[in-house]
Amino acid sequence: MRCHKPATWLSLVIFFCVFSFPFMGASGTDAPSINGHSGNGAEDITAIINGPGSITPSAGGPKHVVQFVPSCTANDPAASPSDWVMCQSATTYCQAMGRSGLAAYTRYVAEVGPPVGPWVPSGTVCLDPKKVQGRAVPAFTLEEFRRLPLPPGAAHIQPEGTWVLVNVPTNVYVIAPRRTFATTLLGFPIRVRATATQYRWTFGDGSFMATADTGGKYPDMTTTHVYQAKQRLQIGLATGYSGEYSVSGGPWMPIEGLAWVDSAPVPLEVIEAHPRLVADNLPR
């Protein structure tokens, strides 16, 4: 006996949002806004900055700037970039890690002013000196990252349809392609990359699964769940995005933390299958 049920599809809905993003720049009282737009499921999403900026941070806007300074004891992040020097220890640091052609830079973060500061060190990275801006640039924080129109992951259930069987593995997997956002912020071109890296499944029977595995179609079933009793329920999925951003073509910088996006719950019925003897009318 073989049963067929119509397949179901999940609609991927991308929400367009408008949010404030003030930063140091031209004077004015109106905070700029970013308008997000995506066309026909494209992986590149363009966001355009509108309106003048504000030198004073406002609620909901970016509160920090960042700059990279060669990791040399003589360099002061508060000094003019023209006073910074590149020392031998900064280049040998990266060479020892097998990254020739790069130099060690200390990442400094400061609150938006006025005045800007103080500058707080936040790690050392190996960067291409030709791509490092000798100035403070916007710090794209987790708060701003979470405001982007990140799409929910597309949850898929197998067997396809509206029902699954008791004591038989139910296969789940997710499709969530990487997204790229291009913005212009007060003269600073910014690109943001969002990559789905974590997934949280809730199976409606009190069970859940947190994993970095997207799972896969049958027979590559690496993320499954077995129901113990018949019931009606909903399967839930939350997709966690990690992000990084680049300012003016500069180095890619990580965004600390994850942005979580919930998918629409998938209704499901768990049923029992009972064996039944039938006459064998097949031709011999």
Image: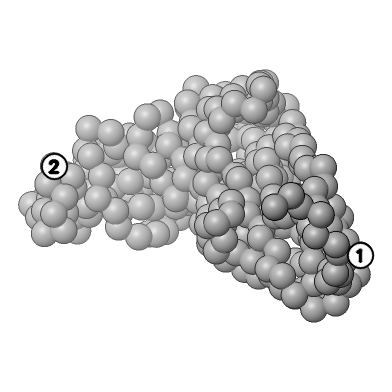
Looking at the image, residue 228 lies above or below residue 247:
below
* Kind of residue sitting beneath label 2: Gly
CA–CA distance between discs 1 and 2?
A: 60 Å
Q: Is residue 282 left or right of residue 23?
A: right
Looking at the image, residue 101 lies above or below residue 41:
below
Res 223 quadrant in image: bottom right
* Residue farthest along the right direction in this orientation: 232
Q: How crowded is mark 1: few (under 14 residues within 10 Å), some or many (20 or more)?
A: some
Residue 71, given in percent of the width and then of the height, sits at 22, 54
Q: Name the quadrant of the N terminus.
A: bottom right
Can residue 74 be seen at all in this image of the molecule? no
The residue lying at 74 percent from left, 49 percent from top is 283
Q: Which element is circle 1 on?
A: strand
Earlier along the polypeptide chain: callout 1 or callout 2? 2
* Residue farthest along the front direction in this orientation: 284
Res 231 quadrant in image: bottom right
Label ID, residue 232? 1
In this orientation, which residue lies closer to the viewer: 267 or 107? 267
Residue for badge 2: 101
